[in-house]
Image: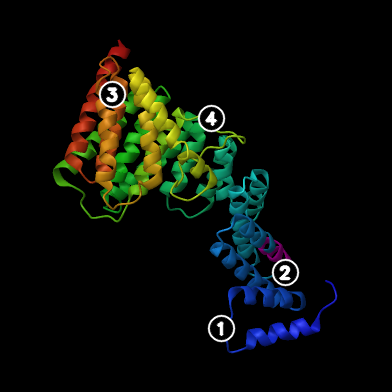
Amino acid sequence: MGMINHGAVLRARVLLLGSGRLGLLEQVDAYRVLAEVSPKAYLPKLVDALLLMSYRSRVPEVDLALTTEAVEAARRIEAGVPTRAERLCRALDAHQRALFALGRRVEGRAACEEMAAAGQNGRLASVLAEEGRFREAAELNEKAARGGTPEVSFWTMVEWAANLEGAGLHDAASAVFRELLDDTRRKAAEQRTALAILTWELVHLSRMREGAGHGADAAAARQEALTVLEELATKGEPKNWSCILGWWVTLFALSGRGAEPPASAGAPMPPFGTDLDRLSATRDAFLGTLPALEAEAAELREAGRMPQLVDVQRRISIREAVREGTRPYQFRNRFTAHFDEGVALARRLSDDPARLARALTDRSMFFVAARTFEPAYADFAEAVTLLDARRGVSAK
């Protein structure tokens, strides 16, 4: 601590004790001065005020300066203060977001590692997944899943399973996802969750098992999903649920990860299996590829390269879902054309039932999200027929 300016300290105290309403910048200036003489009382207030200023900032460089100061102030809070860890983690979280926004990935990861050391490892798991370090991310996911409440969380378990699958640990990934699915079955039977969510999870498990070469498991999951869809088509949801579109977007986006370039530190990808509705630099970059994909689709259409066009159109649909798939207003009207086109294009591939089944499944799950269950059942029933017939041929 340098020489204390007692005049500045007096002015700061008078300012805070005054009857007038202070601006946030005036509060920060006062807390900076008083934190030097009464750190226990004023460092926590300084951290809170700096973070509030950063949340209101629209200039990345200003945001970084404010969060840097907030982290430094939080570290200066005495170790025995009960709120020290919470404030430090909030400051580090804001700081890492500022760093990633400016492309300073190594420093951002370091901030996430410090958060993990303080007990909050969720963001570090996402950052590792963005870089393709799936096994390390999965280890953190396991700690979160096993060290928290006994309640099974869709978001925790899907992220964990996604990272295990990304690491090539397919059986372990399926085991985690089945644990989630068992919990969802129980909740659906007790009307504590939507049958729509159960359907999406069953379909995703079928995709996982198909991708891992376990065709019989995949077929069983599809048949169970078809049974649930039949119930939805004939009876509807037993209860009305608030917006659950995030569940659909998360699993739909995850189903397309294999078609994307591999993630790396130099070319990070979004952390598939997490809530991609949250703003982030990797999400922005992912959505920023839409114009290039649309141009590629136009070229493929012109050249008549239908299989590649079907695949690119699906990547476009996934990005559109990530961008605004959680917004319920005019949901069906905004997305129907994407999925109709996917099916129409795939139907032109008479010798490629797998792509048609995939397009029908995608549209079916979209219809479930739109609460239009009869066409959802019809599409998925056709997809199951195609896949079972193809499996029968393969089995021979």
Image: magenta residue range: 70-79
CB-based contact (under 8 Å), mark 3 and mark 4: no
Residue extending farthest to the top is 396
Percent x, y of residue 272: 47, 39
CB-based contact (under 8 Å), mark 2 and mark 4: no
Q: Amino acid at mark 2?
A: Glu
- Considering the numbered disc 2 on the image, is that residue within a helix, a strand or a loop? loop
CB-based contact (under 8 Å), mark 1 and mark 2: no
- Considering the numbered disc 1 on the image, is that residue within a helix, a strand or a loop? loop
Q: CA distance from mark 2 to mark 3?
A: 63 Å
Q: Is residue 185 magenta?
A: no
**Residue position marked by numbered label 1 in the rendering:** 21
**Residue position marked by numbered label 3 in the rendering:** 346
**Residue position marked by numbered label 4 in the rendering:** 262
State whether the magenta stretch is mostly helix, strand or loop: helix
Q: Compared with residue 98, is residue 127 higher up or lower down, i.e. above or below?
A: above
Q: Earlier in the sequence, mark 2 or mark 3?
A: 2
Q: Earlier in the sequence, mark 1 or mark 3?
A: 1
Residue at image x 52%, y 48%?
Answer: 280
Q: Which of the 4 image quadrants contains residue 344?
A: top left
